[in-house]
Image (cartoon, rainbow, N blue to C red):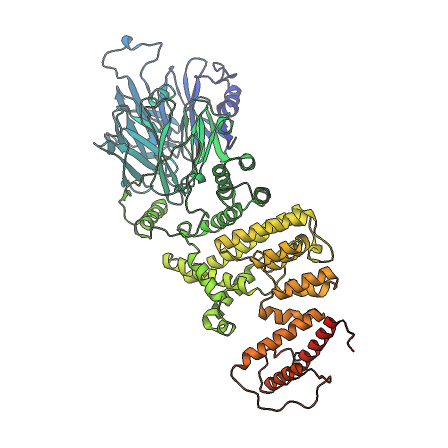
Amino acid sequence: MLLRLVPEFELRRDVVPWLAARGWAAALDTSENSPALYVVNVERNGKIIYTWKGSQRNTHIGLYDLQTKQNEHLYTFEKDLHIISCSVNNERTLLAVSFHQYTEDEPASQLLQSVSKYLTLLIEIHPINNVRVLKAVDSRIRVQFLYPVEDRNASTESRLLLVSEDKYIEQFDIRVVAEEHKVVIQKSGQLPRAKVADDLVWAQWDMMEQRLFYIVPKESKSTLRCVQFYPDENFNAILESHLDISVNDTQLKLVNFGYDCCQDQDVASKSLNLQVFTSKAGGLCVCCSLASDTPDEIMYSIYFLHKDYYVAAYLPGQFLHLLNIRHPDLLCHSLFLTGEDARIDTLQNCSIRSPLVSTVLDCKAGSLYAVNISDSTLLQLLQRSKQDSERLAALHCALLYFQHTEDLEMQIIQWISENLSTCHSFDPIQEFIIASLYCRLCPETQNLDKLLPYTSLLDWIGVVPGVICATDIISLPVLEFQNPKGFWEKLNSNLESVKYSEPHLHYHNNVLRREWRNLSEEREERRTTAYLRNIFENAKKVLSHLDTWDSEARLVPLFEEEDYQQQLLMGLMVAQLKDHLMRHLQYVGKKKIDQIVLDYVANLLNLIHRIMKEVWRRYQLHSCVFCFDERGSAAEFAVFHIMSRILEAANGMCMPLPPGFHTLHLGLGVRCLPLHTLLHYIDIGVLQLTETCVRKLLKDLDDTEQNEKLKFSIVMRLPEALGQKVRQFWNHPINANLIARKYVKLLLENLGNRQCTRSIPERFSVPVEFLPLNYLTSMLTEIENQGVHPYEKQDHVNARFVEEMALKHTMTLLGLKYS
C-alpha cells in the first residue's frame, strides 16, 4: 500500500482495557466495534473525546491524550443519551455537550410539546459542579472550544464556538474564577456572545491553527472565507476567495466539528464534499468532489490558492490519487493509482475525517491513524511501472518526500542505471539531479522553490490512462489583515510573488549555454581578462566545497586535474545563478545568496559523483580500469555506457561535470571500444581528449603495430595546445616526424611576408647533397635567427631537428639503414 497508516489511537486497544479495569465495560461488546462506544471529537494536541454507555445505560464521556497515552473520565449523565457534539477547554475545567433531549426509550410524544429536541450544556468539571444551559432548540448544535497557543499559562477565560444547523456560528466568552480549590463560571447573567458567520452552507474547523473556513453561496460563484482566532484577541475575517462551485445544497456540512456518527454519513450524501488543506510554508488548497451526470465518472477539483506538496484523493475500492500540487502544471508529476495499487486495507468505505495534520480518523472504527507514504511501496512502484508518467511521479515523490535518505537514494540510482533506455519521455539522470537539488536547497530559503528548476521537462504531451485533467486559472484571494505573522505572512508573500513576478521565474540554461560556447572559443590571450578571472575564481570556490574526496572517493578513480572547459562552466553557472537569485531575493542578502549558489553547484557535482560511486560499487570495478595493458570487461563496458548517458544528460542541461570525469570516461573508452568506434566517439565529441589520459596512454603502451596505430590516431586528433604538451612523451619516429612537420608549418605561417637576408650556413650537422632539403633547412635557420619560435618551451625542436627527421624519414621510406 502506497499510503501507510500507523494507528495512533484505537478505541479497542487504548480505551476498552481501561474501561474494563474500572468495571465500566460490562455493557460493551469488546469483540467488535460497538455503537455504545464511539469518538465524538478530536481536540488540539491530540486530545480525543469519546463516549460510552455504562451497565445502567448511563452515558459517560472520557478523554484520551495522545501525548501522555492516558485516559481520563470527564463526566457522567444518568440517562441513555445520544451525544451529538462535545468539547473540553484547554484547562479541562469546562465541558460543552450537545445531545438529544430524549432517547428511543422515551419517545417525544411522552414529553411536553414545549420541550426542545436538542439541548446544549456548559458543565463545570473541575470538580464536577454546576450545569448551565446554552441552547435548547429544535436544530442540532455543534460545540468547539478555542485553544490558546501551547506555551500559554492557564487562562481565566474560555471561548466556545456554537455551530447551528440553522447555518450560523457564534462565539461565547466564558469567564471563570477560582473558589475554594475549584473553578466556576463567573455569575454575570447571560454569557457574552458574538456572531462569527451566518448564511453558510459549509464550514471547517482547523484545530491546530485555530482557523474557521466557511462557504457562503452567491448567485454565480461561492465565496470561501476564513476567520482567524487569536489567543489574546478576538477574531478577524482574514481571507475571501471566489470559487467556481455551484452550491444547491440546503443541508449544512461540517468538517472537523466533532463526529455525529448517526448524522454525518447521511449529510455527506446530500451536501458539499469539500475540505481545505494548509501547510506551514504558506500553502492553501481547496479539494472538492463534484457531482457527475455520467455514470461511472468521478469528478473532483483542486483549487490551490498557493502550492502545497501532496494531497491524497482517495475513493475506497476505486482510486488513490497522490497529487503534486506544488507543481500542478505537469500532470506527470502526480500519481494516479487504481486497483490493487490504490487499496488501503485499513480504511473501509465509511466516514473518514482528517482532524490533524497528516492524520485520518475512521469514525466508524474509532481509530485515528497517522498517514505517511511508504518508501518501500514507492520504490516497488518505481521499479515495476511501465508508464513514463508513473515512473516520473514516483521518482519525484521519493526524492521530495524522503529527502536525504542515503539508502533510498542508492536504490533510486540502481533503478536509473537499469532503466536508462526504458524511459522515453524524460531523462532519469536529469530528473534525479535536478529534483534532488531542488529538494535539498529549497526548504532553506522562502520563495527559493519558485526560482530553481525542479524538472527537465518543458511540457508533457503524454496521457494518463483513465484520467482527464483540465486546468483553469482562478482569481487570487483577497487577504485583509495588518502586520501578518506566521502562516498568513508566508501566504501573503506567496501570493505577492505570483501577482507581481515574471511569468516564468525558474532558472534555465539558455543564456548559460550561449555564454559558455562563446567563451570556449576565445583565443588564449583573451583568457586573462578580469571577467574571466572572476569566473575561474568562482570555480575554485565550488571545488573547495566538494566533499567527493572522502574515504570512498578513490573507489571511483577521478583525478583532481585542471579542466578548463568544466571549470569555465562551473564559474559561469555560479555567476549567472547568482545574478538570477539577486534579482528576485533582494531581502535575503548577498552573502546568503553566495552560499546558496555555491551549495547548488557543489551539490550538483557531488550528485554526479554519487551516481558514479554507486555504479562503480555495483559493478565491482577498481582502479585498474585506468591501465591500458588489457581490454575492458563487460562490467567496464556497462559503466562506460552509463558514463556516456551521464555526459549526455549533463550536456542536455548544460551542467558541469566533476574534475576528471572526461579522463576516466576516455580511459574506459580506450579499454572497451574497438579503434574505429573509439575514434568516432572522439570525433563527434562523446569522448574528449584530456592531457592526463593521453600522456598516460603514450607513456604506458608499448609500440606494437596495433598500439602505434592507436597512438598515431590519437596524436593526430589532439588540439594544437594539448599536442605541444604531450607529444614529447611518445619517443617514436612517427611522432618525431609529425612534430617536425608541424614545426615547419608553424614557422612558415609565422613568417608572413618577411624575407630571408642572411646567407646559407656553411656547415650542417649532417652533410646533405639534396638541394631542396638544403634550401628548406637554411630558410628555417634564418627564420629562427629572426626570433620566430612557435615552440619556445621546447628547445630541442629547431631546424637541425627538422633536417634530422627528414633524413630519417627518407631513409626509412627507401628501406636504407640510417647511421
Query: Which quadrant of the structure image shows residue 245?
Result: top left
Residue 284 vertical position relative to residue 538 in the rendered view, above or below: above
Query: Which quadrant of the structure image shows residue 577?
Result: bottom left
Between 33 and 243, the residue placed more toward the observer is 243
On the image, the x and y values in percent for residue 291 come to: 33, 26
On the image, the x and y values in percent for residue 791 come to: 61, 77
On the image, the x and y values in percent for residue 248 come to: 26, 26
Query: Which quadrant of the structure image shows residue 793?
Result: bottom right
Please state, as top left, top right, bottom left or bottom right, where the C terminus lies in the image.
bottom right
Between 8 and 190, the residue placed more toward the observer is 8
Q: Does residue 796 appear in this view? A: no
Q: Does residue 652 appear in this view? A: yes
Left or right relative to 74: residue 546 = right
Residue 115 vertical position relative to residue 447 in the rendered view, above or below: above
Between 492 and 438, the residue placed more toward the observer is 438
Q: Residue furthest left?
A: 219
On the image, the x and y values in percent for residue 315 come to: 42, 26
Residue 143 vertical position relative to residue 568 in the rendered view, above or below: above
For the image, the number of numbered tags is: 0
Residue 415 vertical position relative to residue 531 in the rendered view, above or below: above
Left or right relative to 678: residue 18 = left
Between 156 and 428, the residue placed more toward the observer is 428
Q: Residue furthest top?
A: 110
